[in-house]
Image: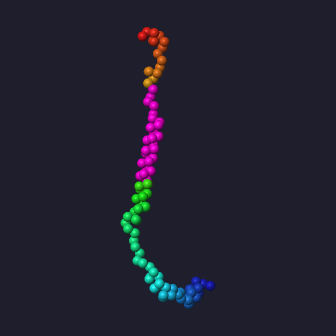
C-alpha cells in the first residue's frame, strides 16, 4: 500500500466535531479569565530575593560570632620571651 492509496482512503472519512450544544454549555459555564495582578506575578521573585538577603545576613552574623571566638593571637615578641643569660641578671 502506497502513501497515495492511504491518503485516498482517509479522505473518504470526514472527522466529526463535538455536538453543537456542547459549545453553548462550555461557554455558559466559563467566566472571563482574570489576569493576576502585577504584585502577584512578582511575589515569588520578591520572596526569593528576601529569603536570599535574610540568609546572607544570617550567615554573615554567624561568621562574625565564630570569628570572635577564634581571634588571631598577636605575634610573639621574641626579644621579651628569650630568657636573659644568668650573668646578665646578676649585673643588674
Whether residue 40 is visible to the viewer of this picture, yes or no, is yes
Looking at the image, which is closer to me, 6 or 49? Answer: 49
Identify the image quadrant of residue 74: top left
Looking at the image, which is closer to me, 74 or 10? Answer: 74
Does residue 74 show up magenta in the picture? Answer: yes
Looking at the image, which is closer to me, 73 or 14? Answer: 73
What's the magenta region? 52-76
Does residue 32 show up magenta in the picture? Answer: no
Point out the residue furthest to the bottom here: 12
Measured as percent of width and height from the top left, residue 48 is found at: 43, 57
Task: Name the chief secondary structure element in magenta.
Answer: helix
On the rendered structure, is 12 left or right of 54?
Answer: right
Residue at position x 45%, y 39% from top? 67
Residue at position x 47%, y 20% from top? 82
Quarter placement of the C terminus: top left
Identify the image quadrant of residue 80: top left
Q: What colour-coding does the image apply?
A: rainbow
On the rendered structure, is 11 left or right of 42?
Answer: right
Measured as percent of width and height from the top left, residue 60 is found at: 43, 45
Q: How many marks on residues?
A: 0
Whether residue 8 is visible to the viewer of this picture, yes or no, is no
Residue at position x 50%, y 87% from top? 19
Measured as percent of width and height from the top left, residue 8 is found at: 56, 88
Amino acid at each position: 500500500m502506497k502513501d497515495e492509496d492511504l491518503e485516498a482512503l482517509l479522505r473518504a472519512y470526514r472527522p466529526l466535531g463535538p455536538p453543537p450544544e456542547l459549545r453553548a454549555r462550555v461557554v455558559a459555564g466559563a467566566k472571563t479569565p482574570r489576569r493576576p495582578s502585577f504584585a502577584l506575578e512578582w511575589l515569588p521573585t520578591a520572596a526569593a530575593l528576601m529569603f536570599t538577603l535574610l540568609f546572607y545576613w544570617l550567615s554573615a552574623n554567624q561568621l562574625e560570632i565564630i570569628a570572635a571566638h577564634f581571634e588571631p593571637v598577636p605575634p610573639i615578641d621574641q626579644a621579651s620571651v628569650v630568657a636573659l643569660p644568668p650573668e646578665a641578671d646578676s649585673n643588674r
